[in-house]
Every structure is written in structure tokens, then in C-alpha cells.
Amino acid sequence: MVEVKLMANIGGHEPKHHSIPMADDAKIAADEGQLTDERWQAIINNDASYDFQFFYAVKTTCIFCRPSCKSRPPNKQNVRIFQNAQQALAAHFRPCKRCKPTGQRLPDSEWVDQITNFIDSHFSENVTLEILAEMCHGSPYHLHRTFKRVKGMTPGEYVQQLRMNKAKQLLADTDKTITDIAFAVGMSSTPYFVTLFKKMTGTTPTEYRHRHKQASETGRLHYEREN
């Protein structure tokens, strides 16, 4: 609270003292980064009148947007609020390909990095082209074409590569069954998993595990002889 003196206009009376409430600076600073109900409504309604009043970022995708962005509304608990694009960039969020919150076109290589990061974190889930397009803010067709041009493979091929690499690790380092490993890498059909594994590695999962154990045992015996 601060006191402001108001001068009387009539009869030369002594000035009166009125207490005028003032907003607390600390509260203003705290509110700037808060997801208020008003801001949340602006986000889910794609309200362009709030553009550049604040920006919102999504923790799960590491992308930030304008309130008017037409992408699918995020989960409320995953949202962070920033006053400007520079703050979001400094916090390691990347600008949305669709709404261009920095006012500049996002380079294709950076967009593909966004897509790749999402796949790296979710390859064991149901990752479809449509889901990627929703999460990374683009059309399925454009995403597929751009990803293949930049990475030299399609998003689907990249997902399969990650799944097979993870499967090889689990086959080598655990005693999980082939079915459990298939589920662990996001494949519900064990026969399809076995077929794809053989197609991509030249051997079945069982053969791969056997050969890896043989190689490990040979290496162990050689080490013991040398020492």
C-alpha cells in the first residue's frame, strides 16, 4: 500500500490523505509465468488476441507456440508460460513449425530434430505419422517428405531402427523372453517382431542371443588365458 496526496480544489482546505492499493511487484512477476484460467482459455480457443502477450511451451515436445496456434491443445499439466519468445528459446524450447512464434520460418533441419527427439522418447509406444504430425505441428505428408529428405529414411523406418537396436540390447543383456522384448520395444505381434528382426539383422532374435552369448563366452575365456 502507498499513500498518495490529493489536493483539494475548493476553499484552500488541507490536502487529504487517501490510501490507494497498488499491485505488489513480486506478485506481478510471479503471475507473468503462471498458466492462469484466462491464458488456458486463450490456448484452447486459439485466441489470436493474446498473441505476443504470452507464449506457451509444451514440456513433452519441447516446442513453444503462440496462443492462436491451431495445433492440438496440449495437456494442461505439460504447459509452461513465457512472456516472450526469447525466454522460451533460452529455456531450450524450439519454435513451432506451424504458428512460427518467432516470426521466422523454422529450418527443416531443426524441425526434423524435433521429430527425431520425440521418436527417440516414444518409439516403444504407438508412433504413427498422424501422431507425429500432431505432436510436431505439421501435416503428415509434409512431415514424411521432409524427414526422409533430411534423414535419408522415413519416420517409420527410423522407428523400426530404434526398436531393433533396443531389441538387440535386451537380447544381449537380459533374459527376457522374445515376446516380452517385442512388447518392450512397442511391437504387440511376436511373429511380426521376429520377421522384422530377421529382415533387418539377418538373424532371428534367438540366433542373435545365442551368437552374442557365444562371443561373450569366447571373449571371457580368452581374457582368462591372457591373465
Image (spheres, grey):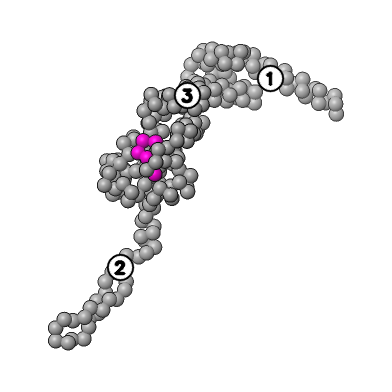
Q: Is residue 125 above or below residue 209?
A: below
Residue 217 falls within the magenta-colored stretch:
no
Q: Amino acid at mark 2?
A: Met
Q: Residue at x 65, y 18 (%)?
A: 209
Q: Mark 3 = which residue?
A: 148
Q: CA distance from mark 2 to mark 3?
A: 57 Å
Between disc 3 and disc 1, whose residue precedes? Answer: 3
| Mark 2 or 3: the one toward you | 3
- In the image, which residues are magenta? 97-102
Q: Residue at x 64, y 26 (%)?
A: 173
- Quarter placement of the N terminus: bottom left
Q: Mark 2 = which residue?
A: 22
Q: Is residue 69 above or below residue 154?
A: below
Element marked by disc 1? helix
Q: Amino acid at mark 3?
A: Lys
What is the total number of numbered labels drawn onto the structure image?
3
- Quarter placement of the C terminus: top right
Left or right for 93, reference 100: right
Tags 2 and 1 touching, CB below 8 Å = no
Q: CA distance from mark 3 to mark 1?
A: 32 Å
Q: Position of residue 78 (x, y in %)?
A: 41, 42
Between disc 2 and disc 1, whose residue precedes? Answer: 2
Of the pair 81 and 190, the residue shown nearer to us: 81
Q: Mark 1 = which residue?
A: 212
Q: CA distance from mark 2 to mark 1?
A: 72 Å
Q: Residue at x 77, y 20 (%)?
A: 218
Disc 1 crowd, CA 10 A, few/some/many (<14, 14-19, 20+):
some
Element marked by disc 2? loop
Q: Position of residue 46 (x, y in %)?
A: 28, 40
